[in-house]
Image (cartoon, rainbow, N blue to C red):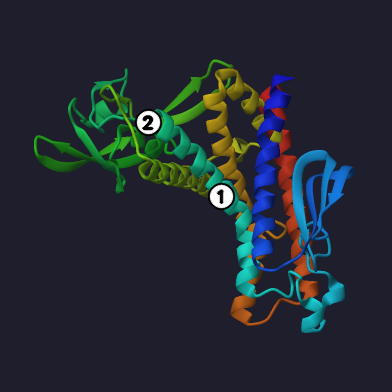
Amino acid sequence: MLTLFAFLLMIGPLIVIHELGHYWAGRLCGVRALTFSVGFGKELWHRIDKRGTRWRIAAFPLGGYVQFAGDADASSRPDPALEGASPDALKGTLPGAKLSHKMFISFAGPLANLVTAVVIFAGFAAVYGTLYAPPVVGRFADNSAAQAAGVQLGDRIIAIDGAKVSDFADIAPRVALYPGQTLNVQIERAGRNFELPVTIKLVTEQDRFGNSYQRGLMGIGGTDPEVRQLNPLAAVGFGVEETWKQIRTTAIALKQMVVGERSVTDLSGLPRTAKVSGEMMALGWFAFIQFIAFVSINLAFINLLPIPTLDGGHLAIYAAEAVRRKPLDIRSQEWAFRIGMGFVLALAVFVTLNDLTQMFL
């Protein structure tokens, strides 16, 4: 029950925030919203506002949509009946909106999720401050990969494979995704800079809930961190930076799966996300809310993939429209949406089966 409660408490608001991003962008651009739905399937409740928008709650809560005027269905596929319609008939509809407005409306949903993550990270930073430790080697783990490569106590890590390191906390995400690979680590020692090739060690770890996971480690520890208090502006900057780090990590992991450097079994779907949400709530509200920020970033990232039916797919179609200087014909868009929907459904089945296998077998 805790897992179910935590999952619904997390996913429900994130879906609403995502769809509100689309809705408000549509209002700003003068596009009428016909339906705002939280969930899919049988309608449990609805209310029609003065603008004619039907606000509804449906039985299946794992999703939602905004259907604008001119949409054929919840996927925002253009209504074939509007093909060749006059400008007056298209006024206030999504197909009749300016191209820049259509792109903004599609991007606004993921943007709302990214802003949510920034607000969460910034809020914690403003209230509690942030931990900072200089990227200086203070100790070694047993069988340390860094020590074997020639790193010494007191060395300052300046960069890893060209990526600048300014905080000891920057090191872990720079190496976690590269177990077994050799990275060039730039060191500052006694006033001189040089590089050392370090082969990252693969480590299997287990958390308090019995979940096993693998990651790359250099096998170093830092000095004792200090708490830094941030003003509101600096806290927002910290939130943006943390959000960007998560986006970068997700993009690298996806690229590794595509090129075969990482197993696709690392993909997670709803079952494992629900399980982890319950575990994070068991750790406390601080961990749970930070996990919400992580899921919000991933929700934005997934939706921006250039797959028809997703927001990124709409943006890809609009990009093609910008290049061609005219919209794609309705038949081409319908085929794109069918292929995209098939891919999304196949991926959903795969990650669900993968989750169940990982969790129970």
Q: Disc number at residue 226?
A: none
**Vertical position of residue 355 compared to residue 88: above or below:** above
Residue 75: image x %, image y %? 77, 58
Residue 165 found in image quarter: top left
In-front residue for pair 286/24: 24
- Local crowd size for mark 1, using a 10 Å CA cut-off: few (<14), some (14–19), many (≥20): few
Residue that carries the numbered disc 1 in the rendered image: 258
Up-down relation of residue 295 to residue 344 (above or below): above
Report whether 68 appears left or right of 81: left
Counting from the top left corner in percent of width and height, residue 264 is at 60, 40
Q: Nearer the viewer, residue 23 or 254?
A: 23
Between marks 2 and 1 in the image, the one whose residue lies nearer the viewer: 2
**Which amino acid, by three-letter code, is at mark 2?**
Gly
Alpha carbons under labels 2 and 1: distance apart? 38 Å
Question: Which quadrant of the rendered structure holds the N terminus?
Answer: top right
Which quarter of the picture shows residue 104? bottom right
The residue that disc 2 covers is: 129
Query: Vertically, is 169 above or below 93?
Result: above
Would residue 319 be visible to someone looking at this image? no
* Relative vertical location of residue 354 with respect to residue 48 in this rendering, above or below: above
Q: Residue at x 73, y 25 (%)?
A: 4
Image quadrant where residue 273 sits: top right
- The residue nearer to you, when weighing 237 against 334, is 237
Sooner in the amino-acid sequence: mark 2 or mark 1: 2
Q: SS class of the residue under badge 2? A: loop
Dot 1 falls on a residue whose secondary structure is: helix
Q: Label 1 amino acid?
A: Val
